[in-house]
Amino acid sequence: MRIQLSDHFTYGKLMRFVMPSIIMMIFTSIYSVVDGLFVSNFVGKTAFAAVNLIMPFLMGASAIGFMIGTGGSALVAKALGEGKKEEANEYFSMLVCVTAVGGAVIATGGFLFMRPISLALGAEGELLENCVIYGRILCISLMPFMLQNVFQSFFVTAEKPKLGLYVMIAAGANNMLLDFLFISVFQWGLAGAAAATVISEMIGGLFPIFYFFRKNNSLLGFGRFCFHGRILLKACTNGSSELMTNLSMSVVNMLYNFQLLAFAGENGIAAYGTIMYVNFIFISIFLGYSIGGAPIVGYHYGAGNHSELKNLFRMSLKLITVWGVALTVLAQALAAPLAQVFVGYEGALFVMTVHGFRLYAPVFLINGFNIFGSAFFTALSNGAVSAAISFLRTLVFQVTVVLFLPLILGIDGIWMAAAVSEALTLIVTVIFFIVKRKQYHYA
């Protein structure tokens, strides 16, 4: 039976609705993870470090897709909840077009200035050349990747989360297959890894365009283009937390790399890259849940259904608690096996990675609440609160902790910085939950 945004949600129905988004986010994270796995084992440590050094810039450049997708889908869902389907489709069409144009401009700039960008990140010699090669090739698919991030949110709003999942499975499976062929079989090295990612991102970003252009049975479809400046501004404001999250994460990851270069050289960057790959997959559960659940929250907020908002809020906190405990235990148990898969070829690097990952693992107890809190207020069209949580979580606290904690604890302070900053953010998130509960009637 088709699940609709207007339904009353039980745990079972909620999980069936959001699970495609969770799996979709996991497959999205597979892009960089699979690249890193093949590059590390078949190309070498320097190439692996290059991927991890330039990736934060590429993810930051694509942040406009997350901003418009999350901020715009909340507005579209609200319009649908108010019974304004024609307006919802106009908003949807405009937001996709703006993303495509903006993505093309950003990709062109990234391609032209990749070398000075890599130099600014601290790359030199062979590491520099690898950064330029990998970064320029990935700029080819930067615009489709932004569209992919937009459609992840809008597939859920259109009540087609499973279709979004199928698209991502196809793209992720394609990436794994092409990585094997281009790197292991054809021996194309780092360029082969980049080419595999480009083709996969083309699938994930361009197929949805064809789907929404044709007649379909979802809630959304491309219609006439109407520029709604107020809606675009509101979508950007509403999604500013997601923009801030991705930009801040990119800046912070660059800062981590600077610190690790100073403390441990290329080994530090390679170890941190391995930890981040596992982190991408683990937090995909929280990100996917937030993407899948936000349109439901937005719809019932627009419909004025306070009882369902309370139900969704309560269930979400319980689910995030269970997942946080499970992921933390799993991270501790899998630290050595996962490090073996990525960097088992070098003893000192393996030991550093296992030690770092075990100190990093407690972050999963906490970060799910902060990710959900930011997304929850975005769905309620309160971009200011959402952005405040995101800004403090991904930039202010992270930068402060990663700069000062290593002065006390050395390199261990770098591994522990994420968990400490998430704990500080959780205090802020809880305060907002308490202060805003009467305004939005979710508790």
Image: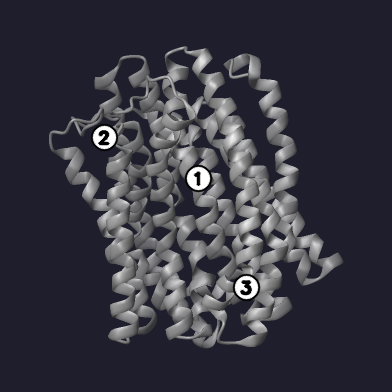
Q: Position of residue 418 (x, y in %)?
A: 69, 56
Residue sitting at 40 percent across and 63 percent down?
A: 31
Please tell me whether mark 1 or mark 2 is closer to you in this view: 1
Tell me if residue 201 comes above or below residue 223 in the rendering.
Answer: below
Q: Percent position (x, y) of residue 234?
A: 45, 29
Give the spatial CA distance, label 3 vs label 2: 47 Å
Observer-nearest of 417 and 11: 11
Q: Nearer the viewer, residue 389 or 330?
A: 330
- For the C terminus, the quadrant is top right
Q: Earlier in the sequence, mark 1 or mark 2?
A: 2
Is label 3 in contact with label 1 (beta carbons under 8 Å)? no
What's the amino acid at mark 3? Ala
> Residue 93 got which mark?
2
What residue is disc 3 on?
336
Amino acid found under the numbered disc labelled 2: Ser
Judge by depth and name the residue closer to the eye, 20 or 271.
20
Q: Residue at x 52, y 25 (%)?
A: 312
Mark number displayed over residue 287:
1
Quick check: 156 left or right of 46?
A: left
